Amino acid sequence: MPILIDGLTSLEYRGYDSAGIYIPGAGSVRAVGAVGSLKSKLPKNLKGESGIAHLRWATHGEPTVANAHPHRDCSGTIWVVHNGIIENHQELRDKLIKEGHKFLSKTDTEVLPHLVEHYFKKEKDLERAVLKTLRDIRGTYGAVFVSEQEPDKLIAVRMGAPVVLGLGDGENFIASDPSPILRHTKNVIYLQDGEMAVITPTSHAIYTFDRARVRRSPEKVEWSPEQIQKGGFKHFMLKEIMEGPEVIENTLRGRLVVDKGLAKLGGLESVSEKLRGVKRIIIVGCGTAYYAGLVGEYMLEEYAGIPVEVEVGSEFRYRKPVMDSETILLAVSQSGETADTLEAIREAKRKGILTLGIVNTVGSTIARETDAGIFNHAGPEIGVASTKAFLSQVTALALLTLFLGRQRQMSLVTGKRIAKELLDLPEKVDIILSDHQKLRSLARKYSKYDDFLYIGRKYNYPIALEGALKLKEVSYVHAEGCGAGEMKHGPLAMIDPNFPTVAIAPKDSVYEKMVSNIQEIKARKGKVLVITNREGKELRALADDLIVVPKTLEMLSPILTVVPLQLFAYYFAVEKGLNVDRPRNLAKSVTVE
């Protein structure tokens, strides 16, 4: 038991809403909250030679004791812990219930032990039962199974969610990353997608899902547990920026029907018909979520043809907004607990308005109180300055635009093009991240300056605001974003050789206007760092420094142009020796006004 509890504690950095433990022959204990809550409930006689334990970050079902892992079959002899999403869980649950299985939670995970139970009755072999179960499920998983009948055997499987084996002396381990293992052994084997591992205290074996034996030598991990938690990165912020491609994939997974140009959003199915009659959308958010909402405003108006207003949550709650039955309020929040955004939802509900949410935390207050919505599936974000959550929020807003647009006048051709370009985004973000050392050099070059202006137009106006916010958050220097067309109305007065400008100028419908704005800055001897997707002589001649990102649709360009700005802010703060993950005076989730 102490090994399992210690392992859970080492994983708390990843975020959690509940925890649980199961030891064959001794029993199971689960609790809502941190590992400390679980530890306080453990009886002294909960002992054994093997066991499984889990920290849950909810994706299906609220954070409750019933929804906490491990989960069991009807007989209480087969148990499982699982990371990932079983996309067809409802279909499987309905089928199993008809066969007489009784479910105790609302999680997608619980179908796993019941399916294994179903096949075990026929196969009388746990490994075969697990493999047959995997044929029935769709989604992502890193899962571990154990049975009362074979308590010294653990079976791990992987498809899209990490699983690592730790090989010790007379003891072996399975975990979702090496941090819980390193206290016991540094010899590890990483499972690959489509592989199953079977371990006992003295042996291990790896197979493909069609039972072909895999032979792979262990690697020796030299990193410390703290380094492992950050994936080898110096800070969580950098780790989370680098997770961008995976985050976009997770946000899109199972939600696009490319050949029909459709977005399939299960969280909106219950209100789909109501959404057809919507004639106005109010988006509410705070900080980075507000800027994501601004990008969404451009998307929804241009492609769905719906008038949109974007409001700061802290101001909305003190206004007397005019709303009617054809208006919806859309709340955007990473934590799902942002106090001002929550109050905006409650004000809308008091007026009988349909409320939607884009949140990253299942079971959060905003997730519970909105009528319907879209979960980000971005995973826990530890760094205070939001990076990967912003990418996920804008991606979710693009999906919503496709969903609402196809309900209205958007053509099949346009829908298919948007869907295809969305699927290409992870690879394009990966291309930007591969050149991160260039951003590091630029951050070093510009770190001597204390004032910055960020400018952009149309879809990239919000990115100018977000880029400036990131630099302020983590480096404490003065940075402000503005629409490039507004420079002559005030901000241009600040420009001099010691006041550099970051200009977001992709080749789009306002490209020529942006070039003109950059020329205005250069005429006043201002330095300019340009983010673009066009490496031409024109910008080369104007820019002091140029960062080129891949091309995509204009509406999706913010997802690419923001990544260099995140890296620039990160390396700028590192250059100044600041605590990037925990900026002074700021909290990750603002739950009070």
Image (spheres, rainbow, N blue to C red):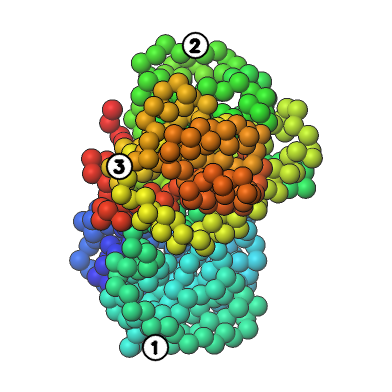
Q: Is residue 415 above or below residue 388?
A: above
Q: Quadrant of the N terminus?
A: bottom left
Sequence-wise, the earlier of marks 1 and 3 is 1
Q: Give the crowd class for mark 2: few <14, some 14-19, many >=20 residues within 10 Å.
A: few
The front one of 327 and 511 is 511
Residue in the image at 49% along x and 29% along y: 483
Q: Is residue 370 above or below residue 265?
A: above
Image-quadrant location for residue 148? bottom left
Given contact means CB atoms under 8 Å apart, are the residues at marks 3 and 2 in contact? no
Query: Label 3 vs label 2: CA separation?
Result: 42 Å
Image mark for residue 202 = 1
Q: Amino acid at mark 2?
A: Val
State the SS at label 3: loop
State the SS at label 1: loop
Given contact means CB atoms under 8 Å apart, are the residues at marks 1 and 3 in contact? no
Which residue corresponds to mark 3? 450
Q: Quadrant of the C terminus?
A: top left
Q: Position of residue 316 (x, y in %)?
A: 40, 20
Q: Is residue 183 above or below residue 505?
A: below
Q: Is residue 65 visible?
A: no
Q: Position of residue 22 (x, y in %)?
A: 36, 65
